[in-house]
Amino acid sequence: MSSKVISSAIVFETLATSVSQCDRSEKFFLHFLEKPMELKLCELIGLKRKIENIDLTALVSSQGPDIEILYLSHQHPILVLSIYEILELREVLSGTFTMLELNSLIHKSIHRKFS
Amino acid sequence: MKDILRRHQVLKLEIVDVINKQIKMEAHSSSAYLAMAGWCDLQGYDNCADFFFKQSEEERKHQLKFFHYLTDMEAQAISPAIGDCQHDFENLRDVFETALDIEISVTDAIHDIVGVCRKHTDIATEEFMKWFVQEQIEEEYIARRALELFDVLGEDKIALGMIEEKILSVSYDGAN
């Protein structure tokens, strides 16, 4: 898996987290916590939605610990996220999709137009 | 950098959301028609029961058509949880009144999806939706004509018997 990570290009990064994409496998790598997570586009979209749907106000005001547990699929580890990590993921995923949409616009207006 | 977004995401997220919402609505309609069929069967209106069993199957087919469209477009289709639906009705007319209300709600929702498609210039999904727009013309027509039988024939026992006889022949011939 590490060779795939090396051949990938950074899509968006913050100080602690980044998302890169591998053109060969057409997958994304979320560099977060210890191990990078390999995600297909639909999984990345699913993760973004789950992160966006977390009710932070309810999390803060709840009696229990301020953590959210996310299950993506059997191929991925269960994510146990603190409020700080949720905010971190929100930022990196929002930035990632902005960049992906920008890349898509560039492809549409330049590459596909003149090919 | 490859345009993975375009290669694997055919539909905009807002389009996926409205179609998933529609999948749920069609599932709920199918469930509601099934409840109507059950009520009619219990009351001895066998043909009306058949009419609603058929309607229930139609809605289920619509649900699957939307579901397959999303999966074909590499989007996540959500199999919906369906809430409770109406099982008790005042009389046979009340059942058909409710059926027409359902069809009007579905038509409005279909038109809203077309509106969202236009907002995002999603021409492919708008084309896909054309079948449903036509289908709703037919569904609403049938629901309205069925209800009109009560206005024409009345609601006494003889009239209800005649409605039972006529209900399965209510159909839409197209805008000819």
Image (cartoon, coloured by chain):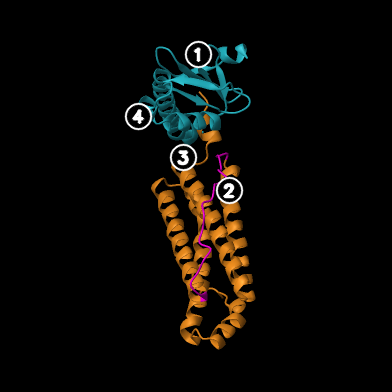
Mark-to-mark CA distance, 4 and 3 = 25 Å
Same-subunit check for callouts 1 and 2 = no
Q: Eyeballing the image, is B117 above or below B171?
A: above
Colour in which the image shows chain B: orange
Marks 2/3 in contact by CB < 8 Å: the verdict is: no
Which amino acid does the dot numbered 3 rest on? Leu
The chain identifier of the residue carrying mark 1 reads: A
Q: Residue B62, percent across and down?
A: 57, 57
The residue identified by callout 2 is B67
Same-subunit check for callouts 1 and 3 = no
From which residue to which does the magenta span run?
B74-92
| B135 magenta-colored | no
Marks 1/2 in contact by CB < 8 Å: the verdict is: no
Which amino acid does the dot numbered 1 rest on? Leu
Colour in which the image shows chain A: cyan
Mark-to-mark CA distance, 1 and 3 = 27 Å
Same-subunit check for callouts 4 and 1 = yes
Between label 4 and label 1, give the one nearer the viewer: 4
Between label 1 and label 2, give the one nearer the viewer: 1
**Is residue B59 left or right of A66 when viewed as pictured?**
right
The residue identified by callout 3 is B13
Q: Eyeballing the image, is B154 above or below A17?
A: below
Q: Which residue is drawn at 51% across and 55% down?
A: B129
Same-subunit check for callouts 4 and 3 = no
Tag shown at residue A57: 4
- Front-most of A44 and A83? A83
Marks 4/2 in contact by CB < 8 Å: the verdict is: no
Tag shown at residue A33: 1
Mark-to-mark CA distance, 2 and 3 = 15 Å
**CA neighbours of label 3 inside 10 A, class few (<14), some (14 to 19), many (20+):** few
Q: Residue A113, percent across and down?
A: 47, 36
The chain identifier of the residue carrying mark 2 reads: B
